[in-house]
Amino acid sequence: MPGNPKIRVLIVDDSAIVRRILAEALSGESDIEVVGTAPDPYVARDKILALRPDVLTLDIEMPRMDGLTFLKKLMQFHPLPAIIISSLAQPSCLAALQALEFGAVEVLAKPGGPYSVGELRQNLAHKVRAAAAARIRRPGIAGTACATKTSAPARLLAPAVSPRTVLAIGASTGGTEAIANVLSLLPQSCPGIVITQHIPAQFSRAFAKRLNDLCAMDVKEAEDGDPLRPGLALIAPGDFHMLLRSTGGRYYVSVKTGPRVCYQRPSVDVLFSSVAEAAGADAVGVLLTGMGNDGAHGLLKMRQAGAHTIAQNEATCVVYGMPREAVALGAAAQILPLPAVAEAMLAAAARRASALDRSAPDANPIHLRPVLAANQS
């Protein structure tokens, strides 16, 4: 648009073919300009200083210096929004998630065939715009890098909750670290959790494994028909929608393909709408950082169904897009900084259990076994 400068992109990849594919994928975007390419981090360093790009796309596996090492140096001395372009091999997936921990804002699968190139053209421009709008987060802010199942900072105690309680979380840009921040504070016996994070296929399994190693509860990539229970978090698999279902007093998830919703698959709106229908007032919905409006209407449906709803505040978002849209719709009952979200989720679940107890004296909300932890500072 006239008067609006284009987003300047530098592409860093050791493959000339990949550099060409990425440049061509962005060539038709009127608001994006590829200002240069680099085959390795040493050339990239010089071009960053000379060309002053707004966004960097970065390969993980490169000669002379790997992408992770370069990213750590970049975030220390010249912070810049970075999109990781990674292969689907499991070690590369894990390295890409490490890159997000180190301060990268997005991850995309490296093109490997005609179909993936087409997918890349659909997704790359969207992620470049999200990266350009991102607030650069210094690595380590989330405080989760060294946490494990048995040692995590200030893990919360489990309140008395209804066994029907469900926690639902949605996020996009910046969401992998935000979700890790929230889940690492929750006790092992917390209510069942369903999560949709915008993430490519294959990366979601590595993301779930990382969270499982980090968090007190069990975390896994969802499979169709998986039951949801207290102490379990299910992650929507990349490129599939996940929906919550209820039958016979029990919850399970449906994992299926289908059209993209809000340009996304998995979609937060799809998950939240299903939670509103299946769990109603027994749910707590949380919309975290992300570009666009996915999840805003679904969060509104949850609130209208009686669920307690929370949106992350602007100051702690990497991109204040999805939460902003939810707030504008009146979908969020609370707007909170990220460090306050986990405690607010448990408090809302406890209030629901207390209300049920008062309205039905014979009801028997379960008290989930507390997990000993340090007091939250």
Image: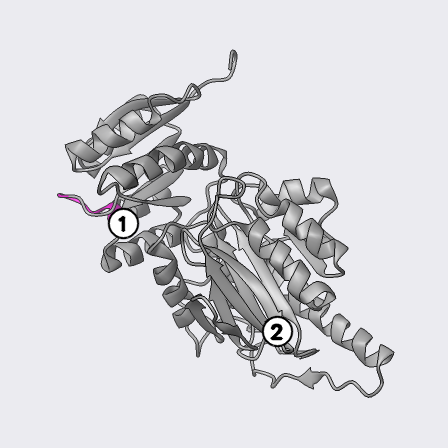
Q: Residues within 10 Å of mark 2 (few under 14, many from 20)?
A: few
Q: Nearer the viewer, mark 2 or mark 1?
A: 2
Answer yes or no: is residue 340 visible. Answer: no
User: For the point 24% across and 35% down, which residue is it?
Assistant: 12
Name the element at disc 1. helix
Q: In the image, residue 90 lies at what x, y percent?
A: 25, 59
Quick check: is 67 in the magenta stretch?
Answer: yes
| Left or right relative to 124: residue 287 | right
Residue 344 position by quadrant: bottom right
Pointer 2 or 1: first along the chain: 1
Magenta region:
63-69
Quadrant housing the C terminus: bottom right
Crowding at label 1, few (<14), some or many (≥20) Cα neighbours within 10 Å? many
Residue at label 2? Answer: 247
Q: Position of residue 356 (x, y in %)?
A: 80, 76
Q: Position of residue 258 (x, y in %)?
A: 47, 49
Which residue has dot 1 on it?
Answer: 68
